[in-house]
Each structure stands twice: as C-alpha cells, then as structure tokens.
C-alpha cells in the first residue's frame, strides 16, 4: 500500500521539494514531481540551481531522457516512467497515486492551499491509507 506523507505549514515549497528530492536520491530512489504545466519549467530550473555548489539533475516528462532520469517533472501523467516516489504539488489528489510506493503532499501557509489539502487528506484517510504528518513549523531542514 502507498505510504502517504503530508508536510504542512511549508513556508518555502521549493526548498522543501529540493530537500526531499535530495533525500530520495541519496536513498537511490526515483522521484516524479507532479505540478501544473505552467510551473514545471520553473521547478526544473530551481532544482538545477538549488545550491551554488551543486545541482539536482532532472527533466520534464516530455523530454527524450525522461525514462532514464531519476527526477522527472510532470503535469499530465500520460506516461509514467517509475512508481517509487510521487511529490504532488497540484490541488487535487492524483488519480494514479496508488501505483507509487510513497506519495508526498506539500501544503503551504495560505488558507486555500490548506483547504484543498484537507480534502486530499480526507480522501486518503477515508480509503484506509495511513498518513504521516510533518508540521514544518516544528521542524528545521
């Protein structure tokens, strides 16, 4: 069964995404970041430039190298190349989430983001998924 994790009260989503992707890569895992199409290139650029001394290699899902790259940024999921870690940055739950070993939901500080996250949380909980909750106001990365 898919492990579900919610990271809430996230002030800087891009920093947390970079942190979680690096953590997954260090564990030899593959990551798909599911976002809006308008945000995909920006997220890709942020990963490539996440630190002055290093980068996180990634491609957009429509790139020819997507099937062999450990970090893929997607917005439509017409082609899924892996089923390991899914980071959801969209407002609704992905219909295909259950094929992944681990689903990560990232929730910001604004009320709209929290409201849509509550709906996703209820959706997963009502279907019997055990949910890990990490309140970022109580954490440091």
Image (cartoon, helix red, strand yellow):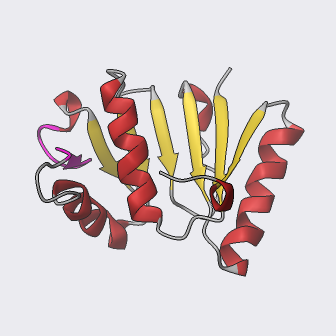
63 within the magenta span:
yes
Instruction: List x then y, in percent, for residue 9.
Output: 65, 65
Count of numbered labels shown in the rendering: 0
Residue at image location 45% in from the left, 55% down from the top: 16
Q: Residue furthest bottom?
A: 111
> Residue drawn 17% across and 55% down?
48
Judged left or right of residue 107, residue 48 is left
Q: Is residue 19 magenta?
A: no
In which quadrant is the N terminus drawn? top right
| Left or right relative to 102: residue 113 | right
Is the residue 8 above or below the residue 132 in the image? below
In the image, which residues are magenta? 56-65
In front of the other: 62 or 117? 117
User: Where's residue 118, x and y in %?
Assistant: 79, 60
What x and y, as percent, mark residue 103?
Answer: 58, 38
Taking the image as shown, residue 106 lies to the left or right of residue 22, namely right
The answer, for residue 133, to whether it is visible in the render is yes
Would you say residue 78 is visible in this rendering?
A: no
Specify the principal SS of the magenta part: loop
What's the residue at 26%, 32% (across, down)? 70
Residue 132 image point, x, y percent: 72, 37
Residue at image coords 64%, 59%: 92
Q: Is residue 122 above or below residue 119?
A: above
Q: Is residue 3 above or below residue 7?
A: above
Q: In this rendering, is residue 89 above or below 22?
A: below
| Residue 15 position by quadrant | bottom left
User: Relative to the observer, which residue lies in front, 79 or 101?
Assistant: 101
């Amino acid at each position: 069964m898919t492990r579900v994790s919610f990271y809430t009260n996230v002030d800087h989503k891009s920093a947390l995404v970079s942190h979680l992707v690096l953590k997954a890569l260090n564990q030899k895992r593959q990551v798909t970041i599911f976002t809006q199409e308008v945000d995909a290139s920006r997220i890709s650029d942020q990963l490539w430039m996440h630190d002055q001394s290093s980068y996180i290699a990634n491609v957009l899902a429509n790139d020819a190298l997507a099937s062999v790259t450990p970090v893929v940024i997607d917005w439509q999921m017409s082609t899924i190349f892996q089923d390991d870690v899914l980071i959801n940055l969209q407002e609704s739950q992905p219909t295909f989430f259950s094929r992944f070993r681990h689903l990560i939901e990232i929730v910001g500080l604004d009320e709209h983001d929290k409201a849509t996250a509550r709906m996703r949380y209820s959706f997963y909980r009502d279907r019997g998924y055990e949910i890990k909750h990490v309140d970022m106001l109580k954490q440091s990365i």
